[in-house]
Image: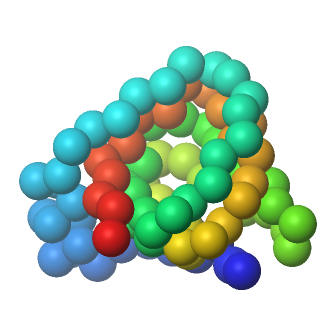
Amino acid sequence: MEIIVRKPTQSEIEFMQKQPIWEKEISTFPYSYDQQEMCLILEGDVEVTHKDGSAKFGPGDLVIFPEGLSCNWNIKKAVRKHYKFG
């Protein structure tokens, strides 16, 4: 399974800006995705590790987590993101 990290298109930015916001302080925790999540990172510095590798992302990145992924989040700087499941 692969976490996709890339710069969003303008239409993706506009779409994601209409989605809810999630915030989390500096922390480390496990998470499992029962459906795909797409998020637009507004603030933060995060590294997510999983059995096949890791992904680092920060402000301006569009991140797609696949359904079925089990991983560990390491939030190094408080994160704020728009998110959409499904």
Vertical relation: 9 (above or below) 83: below
Vertical relation: 22 (above or below) 72: above
Q: Is residue 79 left or right of residue 53?
A: left
Q: Quadrant of residue 9?
A: bottom left
Asked if residue 44 shows in the view, the reply is yes
**Residue at point 88% right, 66% down?**
51
Q: Position of residue 72 (x, y in %)?
A: 76, 46
Image quarter (top left, top right, bottom left or bottom right) of the C terminus: bottom left
Count of all numbered marks drawn on residues in the image: 0
Q: Position of residue 83 (x, y in %)?
A: 33, 52
**Residue at point 54% right, 73% down?**
67
Q: Residue furthest top?
A: 25
Q: Position of residue 20 (x, y in %)?
A: 21, 43
Q: Position of residue 41 (x, y in %)?
A: 42, 49
**Residue at point 65% right, 46% down?**
31
Question: Between 62 and 48, which is closer to the camera in this rendering?
Answer: 48
Image quarter (top left, top right, bottom left or bottom right) of the N terminus: bottom right
Asked if residue 62 shows in the view, the reply is no
Question: Between 54 and 33, which is closer to the camera in this rendering?
Answer: 33
Colouring chosen for the image of the structure: rainbow
Vertical relation: 66 (above or below) 70: below
Question: Between 51 and 56, which is closer to the camera in this rendering?
Answer: 51
